Structure formats: structure tokens, C-alpha cells
């Protein structure tokens, strides 16, 4: 006689159906908040970029932009230009241009600028240079020297020019830079000293790339009150570098003889933390954080036989997401520490308070507290340390996994989920 299959037990069918409904409900909650986080993150990123552009432009107008100090040139006139009585050029001048021997000292002092809640990499620079202008030819020649003024700087103060130790005041029109002219005998030379203090934002560089010939003796020593040294794209590395992390300072040197190069010399000022970019990262990491947060609550509550309704998951996740909503607005209004503390405090109070009010026992409260610490606080803090963000996220996930493994090591999973 063939076996007749027994009908399913009504309680088992109901239990199986309720589990499916619960999982579908949790999935809907996850998808809904993921979409909300992505939309909020995209909106915040666009707003942050607009504010960043506007504020950076305002800071540059008031403080100054990236400074590029151009190299001076020496012009030797072998034959002057010839003009007729009407001023028409008949014959071009015969000239040759070279760069002078240079001994330059630069001091960069970090001076972050702030507008609203945004900070920008400002700096003050002291430029102190000696240029040797010589006549290497076998006859006396008219020689001119032109030093370009870096007009992208906010201002030039304490500007001083001296020729062989004597103040030079013959040129007071700096629209085309500083001009000096003199007839030099063969082998005769002059030392032109130029010093000024200025301020800018972003990068500081010294232009060598436009000169195609061989540079004579060239020395540029740069000191800074920061040790986080980086270089603008396309610039050459120093020939000597001393970094003191403890005193937070650096000494760099570029020293060459007869160098041929198309590169400039430059240093990038360390950029302060982009709070807006980090906050956008917090929002875009919500989906990953929610997977672990909801999974933690589901596992720890299920092993203790606590049955949470999808509405419970919806409201718990809502309390979790309050942090991200508040952060997206408060970071533009108050300092980062206050924005983070207020957002975290409100979110934790609402989430943990709700899990206590529903009276489902300690597993729900514990899992929500642990989830907030690991996947809200931990994941969010990681976005503000971009250098070690990946490591922090990995350690947080490993910690959460280890805790779950410890709690569930002796659990008989049959019928638990």
C-alpha cells in the first residue's frame, strides 16, 4: 500500500509563512532606506560642491590663490633694434636670454582659512632670493634683468630690491615685473637681492618649465612649519629632504648645476579635512551599514526566540537613519564635533529608547546598542579618516562577526531563522 503524504501541520505552515513575510518586510525596509540614503547623499554632494566652489572663490578673492613665482631672465643686447623716422621697425634687435645664477630661500607657513564651516589650505610665504647677473661675453653689453611679480597672490608686503647691497628704486612700475638695466663690462657682475612676503592658497611653485636652456648654478631651499609634504603634478622632487614629524616641520632643497628640465618646483599645502565629502561618504555607506545592523538584530533576537514584526524593523531603522539626516544638515551649520555629537545622541536615544519601550527583552536592546556603536558610530568615524578608512571598516566588520560567532557558537540553528 503506497505511503500517503501527511498534510502539513497548520502551525508549521503559519510559522513558515510568517518568516517569509518577516524577511520580505526587512528587505523592503532595507531597500527603502538605501534609496533614501543614496538620494540624500547625491543631493548633499551637489550642494557641497556648490558651496565649496563659492566659498573657495571668496577666500581666494580675499586671501589669494595659488602662487607661481616665475623665473627672472637676463637679456643681452648685441645689436639694438633699428627704426626709421616714422617709428617703423626696420631691423630686429639681436639679443640672447639666459637665467641668472640663483640662491633662493623660501619659508612656507601654514595658515588655514575658514569660511562658514569649510576650511581651505591657506599659507604665508617669505621669498628671499639673490640673483647674480653677469656678462660672460668678451665685450661690453647692455644687460637687462626682469623679475616677474606673482599677481595671483593676495598681496606683496615688505617688498625690497637691492643691487649690490644698495636699494634699487629706479623702477617703480611693476606692471611688467621689476626691470633693471645697465651696461656691463666683460666679466662684470651684479647681485640683485629681492625679498617679499605674500600669501596664497593651495600650491606654491617656482616656474622653471618655460626655460629651454641649461640652468646655471641654482639653489632653492624651502622650509615649512608642516611635515605633510606633497608636490603638485608635474613638479620635480627635491635633491635633499629632511622631515621632522615630531616638530612638524620640513626642510627641502633643490640644488643643480647646468640643469636642463621642463619641470617646475613646487609644494602642495596640506588640505584640511573636507567635511562635506566625508559626510557624503557617511550617507553612501548607509546600505552596507544597514546590512550589518539589521542582520545583527535579526540574528541575536532570533536565537533567543524574540519575534520582531517588520514594523519594529522599520522604526528601529528609522531611528538609525536619524543620524544621517541630521548630519547632512548640521555639518553646514555647526562645527563638525557638535554636528556629530548631536546627531549620534539623538539617533541613539531614539533607537535604544524604542527597543526598550517595545519590551522584547535584552537581546533587542543589546543588538541595537552594539549595532549603533559598530555600524553607525564606527562606520561614520571611518569616513573622516580617509587614510585608514578601509582598515577601520575591516576591523569593525571583523569585530561584529566575532561577537556574533561568540553568541551563537552553541546555538542549534534548526528552526531559529
Image (spheres, grey):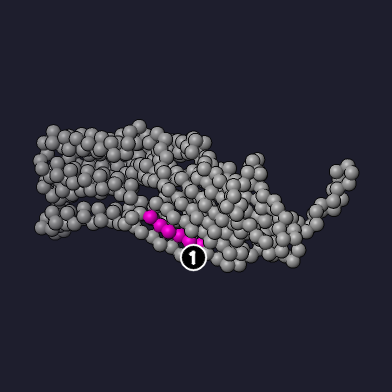
The one of 408 and 38 positioned closer to us in this rendering: 38
In this rendering, position of residue 3 left or right of residue 120 = left
Q: How many marks?
A: 1
Residue occupying image coordinates x 41% and y 47%: 110
Q: Residue furthest front?
A: 166
Q: Where does label 1 land, which residue?
A: 239
Residue plotted at (23% across, 56% down)? 398
Image quarter where the N terminus lies is bottom left
Residue 269 at x, y = what percent? Answer: 44, 50
Question: Residue 228 lies in magenta, yes or no?
Answer: no
Horizontal side of 100 relative to 368 (left or right) equals right
Q: Could you say which is closer to the camera, residue 101 or residue 289?
A: 101
Frontmost residue, 36 versus 207? 207
Residue 98 horizontal/vertical position (percent)? 67, 59
What is the span of residues highlighted in magenta in the rendered image?
A: 249-254
x 60%, y 56%: residue: 191
- Image check: 62 left or right of 72? left
Amino acid at each position: 500500500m503506497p505511503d500517503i503524504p501527511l498534510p502539513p501541520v497548520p502551525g508549521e505552515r503559519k510559522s513558515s509563512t510568517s518568516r517569509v513575510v518577516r524577511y520580505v518586510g526587512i528587505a523592503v525596509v532595507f531597500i527603502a532606506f538605501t534609496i533614501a540614503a543614496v538620494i540624500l547623499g547625491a543631493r548633499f554632494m551637489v550642494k557641497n560642491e556648490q558651496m565649496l566652489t563659492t566659498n573657495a572663490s571668496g577666500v581666494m578673492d580675499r586671501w589669494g590663490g595659488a602662487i607661481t613665482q616665475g623665473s627672472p631672465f637676463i637679456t643681452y643686447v648685441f645689436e639694438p633694434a633699428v627704426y626709421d623716422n616714422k617709428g617703423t621697425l626696420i631691423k630686429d634687435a639681436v639679443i640672447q636670454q639666459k637665467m641668472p645664477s640663483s640662491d633662493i630661500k623660501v619659508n612656507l607657513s601654514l595658515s588655514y582659512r575658514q569660511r562658514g564651516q569649510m576650511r581651505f589650505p591657506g599659507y604665508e610665504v617669505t621669498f628671499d632670493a639673490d640673483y647674480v647677473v653677469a656678462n660672460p661675453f668678451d665685450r661690453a653689453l647692455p644687460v637687462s634683468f626682469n623679475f616677474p611679480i606673482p599677481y595671483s597672490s593676495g598681496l606683496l608686503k615688505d617688498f625690497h630690491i637691492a643691487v649690490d647691497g644698495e636699494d634699487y628704486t629706479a623702477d617703480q612700475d611693476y606692471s611688467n615685473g621689476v626691470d633693471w638695466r645697465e651696461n656691463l663690462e666683460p666679466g662684470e657682475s651684479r647681485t640683485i637681492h629681492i625679498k617679499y612676503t605674500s600669501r596664497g592658497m593651495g600650491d606654491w611653485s617656482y616656474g622653471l618649465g618655460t626655460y629651454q636652456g641649461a640652468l646655471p648654478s641654482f639653489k632653492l631651499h624651502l622650509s615649512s612649519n608642516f611635515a605633510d609634504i606633497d608636490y603638485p603634478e608635474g613638479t620635480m622632487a627635491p635633491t635633499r629632504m629632511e622631515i621632522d614629524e615630531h616638530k612638524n616641520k620640513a626642510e627641502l632643497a633643490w640644488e643643480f648645476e647646468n640643469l636642463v628640465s621642463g619641470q617646475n618646483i613646487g609644494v602642495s599645502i596640506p588640505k584640511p579635512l573636507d567635511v562635506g565629502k566625508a559626510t557624503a561618504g557617511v550617507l553612501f555607506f548607509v546600505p552596507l551599514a544597514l546590512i550589518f545592523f539589521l542582520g545583527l538584530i535579526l540574528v541575536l533576537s532570533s536565537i533567543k526566540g524574540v519575534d520582531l514584526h517588520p514594523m519594529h524593523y522599520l522604526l528601529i531603522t528609522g531611528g538609525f537613519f536619524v543620524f544621517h539626516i541630521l548630519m547632512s544638515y548640521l555639518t553646514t551649520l555647526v562645527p563638525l564635533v557638535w554636528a556629530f555629537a548631536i546627531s549620534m545622541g539623538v539617533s541613539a536615544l531614539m533607537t535604544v529608547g524604542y527597543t526598550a519601550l517595545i519590551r522584547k527583552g535584552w537581546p533587542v536592546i543589546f543588538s541595537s546598542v552594539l549595532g549603533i556603536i559598530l555600524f553607525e558610530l564606527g562606520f561614520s568615524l571611518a569616513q573622516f579618516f580617509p587614510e585608514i578608512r578601509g582598515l577601520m571598516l575591516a576591523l569593525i566588520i571583523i569585530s561584529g562577526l566575532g561577537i556574533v560567532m561568540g553568541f551563537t557558537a552553541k546555538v542549534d540553528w534548526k528552526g531559529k531563522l
